[in-house]
Image (spheres, rainbow, N blue to C red):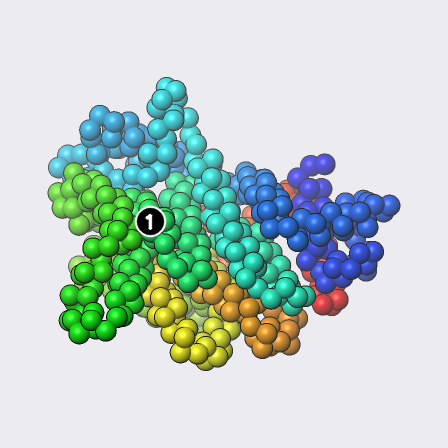
Amino acid sequence: MGLKGLFNSATQLVLFIFSRDSREPGNLPKSGVSILNMPHNRKRLLTVLRTFYDDDRRLQWLLYVLLPICYVLLLTVSTGDHGYSTLEQTFNDMLSHLLRGQFNVDPRIIGIEGFLRDGRVYSYFGIWCALLRLPLWMVGRMNVDVTRWSCLAAVSLAAVAKVRTVVLIRRRSLRNALSDWAIVLMLAYIALGGSEIGYLKVSLYQEVVFWAAAFGAIFVYFAIKGLLSGNFTTGTLSYMGLCAGLAVLDRVSTGIGLTVALVLLLVVLALQSSQDAAAQRRPMLWRLGHALTQRRFLIPLGILAVFIAATAAVNYFRWGNPTTFADFRLYLGNRIYPGRLVHLERYGAFNLRRIPLGILYYFFPAWVLHGSGGHLLFEQMRSRLIDVFELPPSSFLLTDLLPLCFIAFLPMAIRRRHAASRTAVTQCAAIAAGLLVPCLLMLTAIYMSYRYRMEFYPEIDFLAFLGLYLTVSDKALLMTFGRFRKWIAAATAVSILASFAALAMYRVSAFGPSQEFLRNGVLNYYSHPIGSWISHLLGPGTAFHLVRALWLTFRRL
């Protein structure tokens, strides 16, 4: 069939499945677009599709098979040349050194991404992705680049965790047309938008972030599972501790967020477990310490402590300090960023003064536009406080509009909750507060990059899943959802289209400082390479048919 035909067929099928008319057997879309060229077999196809959708197990396995196929195709066609021909061998080389008891890397492989300390070059990347290469060492193939397959495994794992979360929510929902529609929209967003689509570019940098996001997605799954069941078991908390520990070993900013979320949750659970009259007479610290000695809390804390200790040991042998994760004064790439040392000296690696710039970068990307004087907007402020705004421009208000819609239902749901729900609300607040930490770190960082947006997804996903659950399990909120279903469906379409647009821009964007690339304007930078890539990938008419099919589907809602 070819990639173009496969994309066309998949697009038409997905749009048809997600349209309201597909709920009634024999009711066909009126768009005039053929569905996989099946003129005599449509009713049977609808029956099969509904069978898959109505059965949780079949639906999950269908998505588990289809989504990795989609991701591997997009990873194949969205691989760009970032200029570092040997960089993808960094984790292979890191593992080779670790197996010899060494913590440095080959400077010829890591290039300017290394850190020179005491005559040796080190990497600041966590060792998790290096440990993933152990099978290569076992079979004597340490020269093989598996970056693409590692990225695929991570993004597929994250998608599986999110699909399972939605299915978990569906089992506790009101089973009617409106709740089914809300569930379908979220599944469409997970499958065709958000963090599963917009970042599918093969690179060493992206691999690390993909795995951090995967651990975050699994952590959120177990958090939602504990909240919905009303019982955070030892097993649930242990898996959350494992995810937090692995995230620390992979990418510390994500790991800190998951760790803080878990610790705050454990504190809340410990205090809530000592509510009897005798315990209430004791000081709060005594009650907290006594509760935390229980097996339910000791096991997840012990698992987390093992990974934190391993990370601290790596930090010590790299930097001479177990609490140092990178020393950018030693960074070999500082020659590309002449202002970095000044920024570090004046404001540090993270500073609250950068929050306005962070909000601008991640939500309102006007920084790519030129002002009346010919200079980029906010360039003076940017050059004073941070190193780089990295391309491409993007906004959560476009790529993730659907989850933001469900998050908007949270305040209404909380106001409707009775005193009996305060226990769960406190637990939710503890988790959300911890997951907010990576977001704040990215908003205050000295370097702002498109891939760093993935640090926001554990928080966005957690709050969106809560909003989805509270919506589909409450009749009054479902009625409110029903009144706005056209707009929420439109938000889903915007999220999907914006995610693919962001992927197209990410595919052709160069890493590093954006000022030189934007000298002749953002449209001039992107128009030709994106047009050529899309034309090569899909053919000139596919985009038109995709937009037309989405519009016709929206009209039938």
Relative to 248, 278 lies left or right: left
Residue 344 x %, y %:
21, 57
Residue placed under numbered mark 1 in the picture = 238
The furthest residue to the right? 40
As helix, strand or loop, the secondary structure at mark 1 comes to: helix
Q: Please tell me which residue lies in front, 294 or 189.
A: 294
Instruction: Residue 205: name its quadrant.
Output: top left
For the point 38% across and 25% down, which residue is it?
136
Q: Please tell me which residue lies in front, 184 or 489.
A: 184
Instruction: Count up the numbered dots.
Output: 1
Does 58 sit above or below residue 377? Answer: above
Relative to 94, 148 lies left or right: right
Residue 31 x %, y %:
79, 59
For the point 42% across and 50% down, which residue is it?
218
Badge 1, how many Cα within 10 Å: few under 14, some, many 20+?
A: many
Relative to 434, 367 lies left or right: right
Residue 194 x %, y %:
51, 56
Disc 1 marks a residue whose amino acid type is Ser
Instruction: Residue 358: name its quadrant.
Output: bottom left
Relative to 512, 75 lies left or right: right
Q: Quadrant of the N terminus?
A: top right
For the point 64% across and 42% down, which residue is it?
536
Does 384 sit above or below residue 116? Answer: below
Q: Is residue 364 visible?
A: yes
Residue 207 x %, y %:
41, 42
Q: Quadrant of the C terminus?
A: bottom right
Q: Is residue 358 visible?
A: no
For the point 35% across and 66% down, which residue is it?
427
